[in-house]
Image (tube, rainbow, N blue to C red):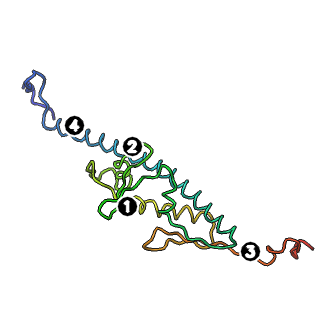
Amino acid sequence: RGRARGRPRRRDRAGEPAMSFADSLTKIVEEKQSEQFDREREAGKWGKYEARLLDQAVELFKQRCTREAENQKCDATISFEVLSREIEDFPKRVLTDSTYFVDSWGGGLSAESWFYSTRGSTASWSPGAPVLFADVLQGMLPKFVERIKDLGFEKCTHRAGTWKVSVSWPAPTEDDQQPGKKKRKDRD
């Protein structure tokens, strides 16, 4: 390994020792590892931001369900896309040629953060490439549904082909509806 003894190392035009081919390969690996680390860091920004957006969407969902319960209903169907419009920092969309694209990301983020978070740090990003708004929603919807399922609903389903999530909760029993009447267990 290394150069043969007694042979002087080649020099570049500035008089500095020239880099061997193997050294140049090592440098390429080092640059690519650094690039991948930067991409992973960028992806992490979206992950944290997305979690905050999902928290806000869940709170809005709970408010909608509460309104339905106040109207004496035991179910609700709510659109994740409609909720997203009510979240101030949610990525904004713009209509171009009958297709919605992300217009702005909010939170000081860029499409690059979202891309590496959803496609992986080894994927190749093209700066300036438009991102379909539906792709952003589609990536978040399963995570949103999982959070909704954790709320203890009797039933929680995503309606295929839509942004809608349907939930139901138990109807009150007869005993629950008569506050003056004590349950048998309470009387004994």
Q: CA distance from mark 1 to mark 4?
A: 36 Å
Seen in the image, is 178 located left or right of residue 84?
A: right
Q: Position of residue 173 (x, y in %)?
A: 76, 77
Graded by Cα atoms within 10 Å as few (under 14), some (14 to 19) or many (20 or more), the crowding at tag 4 reads: few
Q: Amino acid at mark 4?
A: Lys
Graded by Cα atoms within 10 Å as few (under 14), some (14 to 19) or many (20 or more), the crowding at tag 1 reads: some
Which mark lies nearer to you, 1 or 4? Answer: 1
Label 3, on which residue?
Answer: 172
Q: Amino acid at mark 3?
A: Pro
Q: CA distance from mark 3 to mark 4?
A: 68 Å
Label 1, on which residue?
Answer: 135
Label 4, on which residue?
Answer: 27
Q: CA distance from mark 4 to mark 2?
A: 21 Å
Mark on residue 41? Answer: 2
Q: CA distance from mark 3 to mark 1?
A: 39 Å
Seen in the image, is 151 located left or right of residue 108?
A: right
Which mark lies nearer to you, 3 or 2? Answer: 3
